[in-house]
Amino acid sequence: MRPGLTSAGGKRQVSTAERPASQRSAGQEQRRKGPSNTSLTSIDLDKNQVSDEGASAIAAALGHNTTLLKLGLAHNRVGDVGMKALEEVMACANTSLLLLRTTGNPAHPALLQRLATAVTGNVKAPFNIRFRFACVYRYRQRIRRNRPELAGTPPFDWNISPSLPAGLAFNPETGEISGVPQVFWQSSLFTVTATNASGTSTTHVQVQVDSGVIVSSPSRLGAGQEQSDRFKVAFEFLDQERQGVLSRERALQALTTLRLRTDDFEELVYMLEIPVDGWGEPIIDASDFVSIARAASTPTPELLTYPTRKRHARA
């Protein structure tokens, strides 16, 4: 019933729009304001008989949507009218959509190409590539996974040239360097490149693999023993059940007590090849904890020397 009319019982009916916001339901308030989805990132409408009218409605929604990344409209019935509506909103309003499939529609090919160009405009070219850690490693010692950070719109395709020294691997999907160096390698430059639909960015990194032999004075050796003793005390304090091992939670608590960093704990466990149980949880003995604590006390844990011993998964 329209606002201002009365029902058969003589009572005036008040429309949703006339009601105070406090009296409107959440759904009514949402419908009054219009759609504002904040979590939807992908819609697949391929082969759904979408027409010009449907494409125009989608274009109107895209004008204020900031989360949708992928939209499939391939093999529908969208003609020039619908594609023009999409092109206009992509050129002027939407900045989030990164992938739009439109093949198999009757719209003019030139219009489809302009729309593809408008969507590509939302993809920011990569720039400012930098690796989190220096690429200086020790022979036959597992390194921390070294993933680069950069600005731009993912996903990126990664490449490194020339090939890394034997034992080190480069992930072409993430740019991450990982592995266990199997050869000595004098410091040399490697070129790392990231590419997406809008461009390419390049950086250079120095990679070095050395023996790790460090000549220490007696005073430094004594300080190192004192440090290890302090780490063992922290281990024993947290090993309250006297089982000779610490869980992840207890190890993190011990590191916090020692005022050592914990943000890269998982990477240190990976690098030091700490044994794990059947659920993937690290089980850390006293020697393991001393190694983790020493690693957590330096910004370059891959350059320290750790005990070499056979490791077996503990039950």
Image (cartoon, helix red, strand yellow):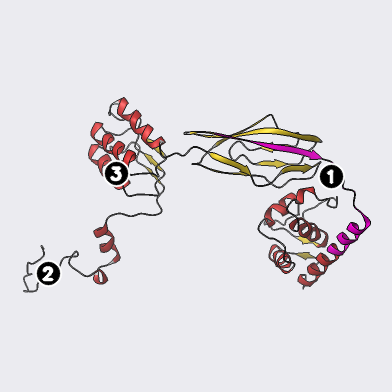
Q: Nearer the viewer, residue 26 or 123?
A: 123
Asked which secondary structure carries label 1, the reply is loop
In this picture, residue 269 sits left or right of residue 9: right
Residue depth check, mark 2 versus mark 1: number of the one nearer the observer = 1
Placement of 202 over or under 300, stated as above or below: above
**Disc 3 designates what residue?**
58
Mark 3 or mark 1: name the one nearer the start of the chain: 3
Looking at the rendered structure, the kind of residue marked 3 is Ile
**Disc 1 designates what residue?**
212
Q: Which mark is residue 248?
A: none
Residue at 25% x, 41% y is 56
Q: Nearer the viewer, residue 35 or 63?
A: 63
Residue 112 is drawn in which quadrant? top left
Looking at the rendered structure, the kind of residue marked 1 is Gly
Asked which secondary structure carries label 3, the reply is helix
Asked which secondary structure carries label 2, the reply is loop
Mark 2 or mark 1: name the one nearer the start of the chain: 2
Residue 63 percent location from the top left of the image: 31, 46
Residue 94 in sight here: yes
Name the residue at the right extreme. Answer: 218
Residue 264 percent location from the top left of the image: 67, 55
Neighbourhood count class around disc 1 (C-alpha, 10 Å): few under 14, some 14–19, many 20 upward = some
Q: Nearer the viewer, residue 309 or 199?
A: 199
**Disc 2 designates what residue?**
13
Q: Which residues are magenta?
A: 201-227
**Is residue 195 rendered magenta in the image?**
no
Separation of marks 2 and 1 at Cα, in angstroms: 84 Å
Q: Quadrant of the N terminus?
A: bottom left
**Is residue 215 rendered magenta in the image?**
yes
Neighbourhood count class around disc 2 (C-alpha, 10 Å): few under 14, some 14–19, many 20 upward = some
